[in-house]
């Protein structure tokens, strides 16, 4: 795809953005500090990337966003920013499952060397007795989501196990062939997003992009407990 390709990875506390200035160019990646009340670090990081390559948002051809599961605020900020940029520029949008980003990050870092057909299980968003379990399969050199949903350790894992910082020890005990600490990078998100877009997968309209949450956000649950079921949507 001609034109600049941006990727946003804010599913975890440590975030990053990446830019491929044009087709065939190297990916330039920058960290995004955790959000605070004083500054919009995401837009500063995006603006710095574009300035470094002499580009403007009008040069955007596509944006890939790590859609979750992950942190509530980070995902909302990432999706809202991508939606706004796509709405203004008319660029394409790709929602990339965050578990797939973690696996691709490990491949880029050579922490996991996998041929086509290799399988991994990614455990994120642990809470109580369950977690979001994603089965990832490598096809044509790229990890893809094969299955995802809430599960307990009794559901088991297949292949190499990736866990985030919140996964309990019960998950690690289920690993048949090793455990890796999951990491996330915007560069990996960009690579998967470009691969998906090349195969015709994209968000139909900017307003259709939404974070993937494994459960109702706690803020919504607390609000509805106080004001009644369904009150958060009114």
Image: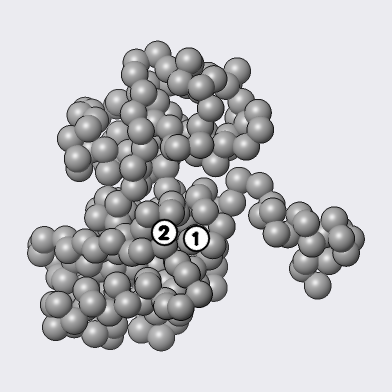
Q: Is residue 130 left or right of residue 112?
A: right
Q: Tag 1 or tag 2, which sits nearer the N-term? A: 2
The span from disc 2 to disc 1 (Cα, nearest Å) is 6 Å
Q: Is residue 30 left or right of residue 151?
A: left
Q: Nearer the viewer, residue 48 or 68?
A: 48
Q: Can you say whether 17 is above or below 127 in the image?
A: below
Residue pictured at 36% horizontal, 58% vertical = 15
Residue pictured at 43% horizontal, 29% vertical = 121
Q: Residue furthest left?
A: 25
**Which residue is labeled 1 in the image?**
75
Percent position of residue 180, x then y: 34, 28
Percent position of residue 222, x then y: 78, 57
Quarter of the picture holding the C terminus: bottom right
Quarter of the picture holding the N terminus: bottom left
- Disc 2, disc 1: CB below 8 Å? yes
Q: Can you say whether 66 is above or below 215 in the image?
A: below
Res. 140 in view: no
**Which residue is labeled 2 in the image?**
10
Q: Secondary structure at mark 1?
A: helix
Location of residue 54 by image quarter? bottom left
Count every numbered label the image shows and give the total. Answer: 2
Residue pictured at 69% horizontal, 53% vertical = 218
Query: Residue 146, which numbered label?
Result: none
Q: Secondary structure at mark 2?
A: loop
Res. 213 in view: yes
Residue pictured at 43% horizontal, 54% vertical = 13
């Amino acid at each position: 795809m001609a034109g600049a390709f941006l990727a946003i990875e804010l599913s975890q506390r440590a975030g990053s953005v990446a830019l491929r200035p044009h087709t065939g160019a190297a990916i330039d990646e920058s960290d995004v500090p955790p959000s605070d009340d004083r500054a919009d670090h995401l837009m500063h990081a995006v603006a710095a990337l574009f300035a470094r390559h002499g580009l403007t948002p009008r040069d955007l051809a596509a944006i890939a966003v790590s859609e979750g599961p992950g942190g509530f605020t980070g995902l909302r900020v990432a999706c809202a920013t991508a939606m706004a940029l796509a709405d203004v520029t008319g660029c394409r949008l790709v929602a990339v499952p965050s578990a797939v980003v973690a696996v691709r990050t490990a491949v880029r870092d050579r922490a996991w060397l996998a041929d086509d057909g290799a399988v991994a299980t990614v455990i994120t968003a642990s809470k109580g007795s369950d977690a979001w379990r994603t089965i990832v399969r490598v096809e044509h050199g790229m990890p893809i989501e094969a299955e995802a949903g809430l599960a307990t350790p009794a559901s088991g894992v297949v292949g190499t196990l990736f866990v985030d910082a919140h996964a309990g020890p019960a998950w690690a005990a289920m690993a048949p062939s090793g455990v890796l600490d999951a990491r996330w990078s915007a560069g990996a998100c960009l690579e998967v997003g470009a691969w998906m877009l090349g195969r015709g997968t994209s968000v139909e309209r900017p307003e259709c992009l939404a974070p993937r949450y494994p459960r109702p956000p706690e803020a919504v649950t607390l609000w509805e407990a106080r004001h009644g079921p369904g009150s958060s949507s009114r």
